[in-house]
C-alpha cells in the first residue's frame, strides 16, 4: 500500500481519490472547498480543508509522509504551481498534475511535476526547441507565433525594478514567473527588484522574443 495525497477534489480529483481508496490505497483528499471535502470524506482515508496558497496551512498537511501526489486544481494555475512546489519541497517521489492546456502543462513540468495529465486533450501537440542566443536557456513553442522562454538576466537589469525595465513596452512579452534559487515568484509585481541569478520565464510572440536576444 502506498500513500497518496490528492489536492483538488473537483470531478477529476475526486474520481481519482475514490478509485485509489477502492483499490486499497491510503488516500488524503485536500481542497479549500469544505462542501467538496464533506462529500468525499466517506470515500477516502482522510479529508482535509486547506487552501494550498496558504503556506502555513500547507505545512500542517505533512506532505513528506506521502509517496505520490495528484494535483488537480487546473482552474487556478497559480494555486496549482504552488501546490506542485510544496510537493516538490516535501520530496514526494512522484507528482502528477492536471493541466488545462499545453502551456500550463509545460509550466507545471518546469516547477516540478513528473507527469502531466490533460483529460480534455489526452495527447496535446508539444514542441520543444532551443532558441539561439546565450541568454535564452530554454523555450517551448506552443504555436507557430508564440513561445514561452526562460531568460537569463542581462547585467543592465540587475538591481532594477520591473517597472523600470518596461519589459512589456520594449519586448511585448508577459512575465509569467521569476525563479530565484528555490523560490518561485508567480506574476511578480512591478516593484519586484531583479537580482543577477534570477531566471525569468516570459510568454510572447516569437518576433518580439527575438528582440530580447539582441539585448546582449
Image (cartoon, rainbow, N blue to C red):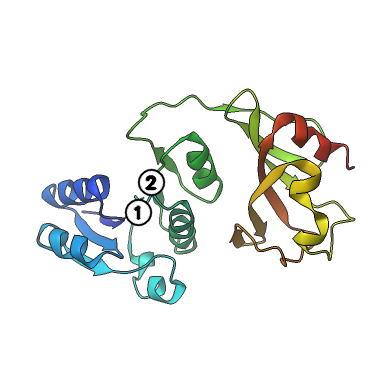
* Location of residue 194 in the rendering, given as x and y in whole percent from the top left corner: 77, 62
Q: Is residue 31 left or right of residue 155?
A: left
| Residue 115 sits in quarter | top left
Name the foreground residue: 89 vs 158: 158
* Location of residue 138 in the rendering, given as x and y in whole percent from the top left corner: 68, 38
| Residue 87 sits in quarter | bottom left
Name the foreground residue: 173 vs 91: 173
Q: Earlier in the sequence, mark 2 or mark 1?
A: 1
Distance CA(mark 2)–CA(mark 1) = 6 Å
Residue in view at x 23 percent, y 46 percent? 11
- In the picture, the disc for residue 104 is none
Q: Are marks 2 and 1 in contact (CB under 8 Å)?
A: yes
Q: Is residue 144 above or below residue 178?
A: above
Q: Is residue 51 left or right of residue 35?
A: right
* Location of residue 37 in the rendering, given as x and y in whole percent from the top left corner: 20, 63
Q: Is residue 193 above or below residue 148?
A: below
Q: Is residue 97 left or right of residue 211?
A: left
What quarter of the picture does the C terminus occupy? top right
* Location of residue 152 in the rendering, given as x and y in whole percent from the top left corner: 77, 48
Name the foreground residue: 77 vs 113: 77
Q: Which residue is label 2 attached to? A: 96
- In the picture, the disc for residue 69 is 1
Residue in view at x 82 percent, y 36 percent? 211
Mark 1: give few (<14), some (14-19) or many (20+) Cα within 10 Å: many
Residue in view at x 34 percent, y 71 percent? 61
Amino acid at each position: 500500500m502506498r500513500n497518496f495525497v490528492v489536492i483538488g477534489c473537483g470531478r477529476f480529483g475526486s474520481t481519482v481519490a475514490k478509485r485509489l481508496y477502492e483499490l486499497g490505497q491510503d488516500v488524503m483528499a485536500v481542497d479549500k472547498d469544505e462542501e467538496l471535502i464533506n462529500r468525499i470524506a466517506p470515500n477516502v482515508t482522510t479529508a482535509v480543508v486547506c487552501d494550498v496558497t496558504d503556506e502555513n496551512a500547507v505545512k500542517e498537511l505533512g506532505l513528506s509522509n506521502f509517496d505520490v501526489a495528484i494535483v488537480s486544481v487546473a482552474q487556478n494555475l497559480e494555486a496549482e504551481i504552488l501546490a506542485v512546489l510544496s510537493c516538490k519541497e516535501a520530496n514526494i517521489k512522484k507528482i502528477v498534475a492536471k493541466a488545462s492546456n499545453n502551456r500550463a502543462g509545460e509550466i507545471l513540468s518546469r516547477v516540478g511535476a513528473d507527469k502531466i495529465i490533460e483529460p480534455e486533450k489526452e495527447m496535446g501537440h508539444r514542441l520543444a526547441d532551443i532558441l539561439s542566443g546565450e541568454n535564452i536557456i530554454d523555450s517551448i513553442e506552443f504555436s507557430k507565433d508564440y513561445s514561452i522562454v526562460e531568460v537569463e538576466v542581462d547585467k543592465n537589469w540587475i538591481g532594477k525594478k520591473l517597472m523600470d525595465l518596461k519589459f512589456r513596452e520594449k519586448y511585448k512579452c508577459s512575465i509569467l514567473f521569476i525563479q530565484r534559487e528555490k523560490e518561485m515568484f508567480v506574476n511578480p509585481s512591478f516593484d519586484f527588484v531583479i537580482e543577477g541569478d534570477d531566471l525569468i520565464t516570459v510568454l510572447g510572440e516569437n518576433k518580439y522574443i527575438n528582440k530580447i536576444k539582441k539585448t546582449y
